[in-house]
Image (cartoon, helix red, strand yellow):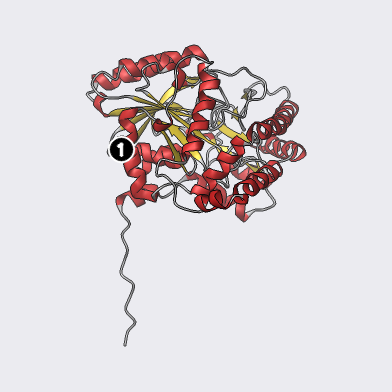
Amino acid sequence: MQEPTEPEFQPSQRAQQAAGQPIAALMDQALARPDLISLAAGFVDQASLPVEPTRTAVDALMTDHGSALAALQYGPSDGDRQLRTMLCERLEQTDFDGRTKTISPDRMLITPGSNQLLYLIGDTILDPGDIVLCAAPTYFVFLSILKNLGARAIGIDSDGEGMIPDALLAVLRELQNSGEIERVKAIYLTPYFDNPRGVTMPLQRREAIVTIAQEWSRKRPLYVLADNAYRELRYDSDNVPSLLALDHNQHTVVEIGTFSKSFSPGLRVGWGVLPSALLQPVQSQKGNLDFGSPYFSQRIMAKILELELYDRHIATIRECYQTKRNAMCAALEDVFRGASEIRWQRPHGGLYVWIELPEHLSAGPTGRLLKTTLDEGTFYVPGEYCFPSEGTSPRKNTLRLSFGVQPPEQLYRGVAALGRAVDKCL
């Protein structure tokens, strides 16, 4: 008797839209070649992970039987109240400078990392075909989220200070003239040391973008999604107030943060401050998804903040990453000395350096440079991945380097390998 064949499975439309994410291909290359010096992955430094602070917090949490039982139980769907309160107090101290403005913990939602919150917000405000305006280039994982949701990402011109307000205004007017303005639901920004360019948006430009969003919110909300994953990784620049602090009616800006880069990605704790109108729908989406984020991780982070261990760790990793940033920039200056057609901007924080090559040299996934770079023993993120599919044209002569993972001596070797590959392709 013939064995029955397995029936053909047809994934849902959303599952099909999720396929082919660039990050998967990059990680496959890294795993297949463990000898490679990765300048691609935006991971944190292994040696700087907070083992002792976490052990101290866990010990303190588990010493009291009642607190240990509570931490091992389900938690509130919107997140641990103590953690939300302390995070709001930190925001008020940092951004509102003792003024009477307060941020209610009731407007804060805790999620397992910030990516889930970005997805939940997108799933809440976007129907298929709706539009999000993003800086070009932008965080390419968020572009994959939008693709998964069936939304359109339109790129807005940016420069060394982030998204250009006049360019944003011009695109909004174009969409109004084409009859598509009702489909524009959000503006996405990474205002601090952004991924991929490492640039920080100055105060005046932040104010302009929040004002534009408010002016174009007359008929329906135009939200500003401020993804602040790298805010704490500041090395040699002054603090700039958040976009939330500039949103005086608190109806426009969604402030999104995470402990993944500033403390530990393994704990998976992120958070967001949402406008009141958006909060309940996102909470409902989240409740259907997970009944609340892992409570044990939240109680650990609350204890870390309570014991004042977090800021000490921030000081440690800032020193670590500043040393690595300096090493990568010194390597770039040495390896590409005299090559005026190769440009980069020294970041004041974050984990990334953005490289612009001569116009005729493609750094894209199908270009000769990426293969040659792999042959030389290193690899990078093609800048092409970071451009939305509409709006500003992708710049195939760009690439992103990360200095988060490798020690300084390996950073030099990796940049030198990239230099050899560029020489061969030029």
Task: Write the residue at 64% across / 40% down.
Answer: 39
Residue 178, position as x, y percentages in the image: 24, 22
Residue at far top of view:
204
Q: Quadrant of the N terminus?
A: bottom left
Residue 303, position as x, y percentages in the image: 59, 40
**Within-10-Å neighbours for mark 1: few <14, some 14–19, many 20+:** some
Q: Quadrant of the C terminus?
A: top right
Residue 373, position as x, y percentages in the image: 64, 42
- Disc 1, SS: helix
How many numbered marks, from 0 up? 1
Nearer-the-camera pick, 184 or 368: 184
Q: Is residue 329 above or below residue 17?
A: above
Q: Is residue 176 above or below residue 196?
A: above
Q: Look at the image and tell me whether residue 140 can be seen.
A: no
Location of mark 1 (residue)? 281
Nearer-the-camera pick, 34 or 279: 279
> Left of 362 or right of it: where is 118?
left
Give the quadrant of residue 148: top left
Residue at far bottom of view:
1
Nearer-the-camera pick, 350 or 78: 78
> Left of 15 or right of it: where is 24?
right
Residue 61, position as x, y percentages in the image: 60, 47
Task: Write the residue at 54% across / 15% down.
Answer: 97
Task: Write the residue at 64% across / 19% down.
Answer: 237
| Amino acid of disc 1 | Pro
Give the quadrant of residue 117: top left
Task: Write the residue at 64% across / 36% down.
Answer: 307
Q: Look at the image and tell me whether residue 64 can be seen.
A: yes
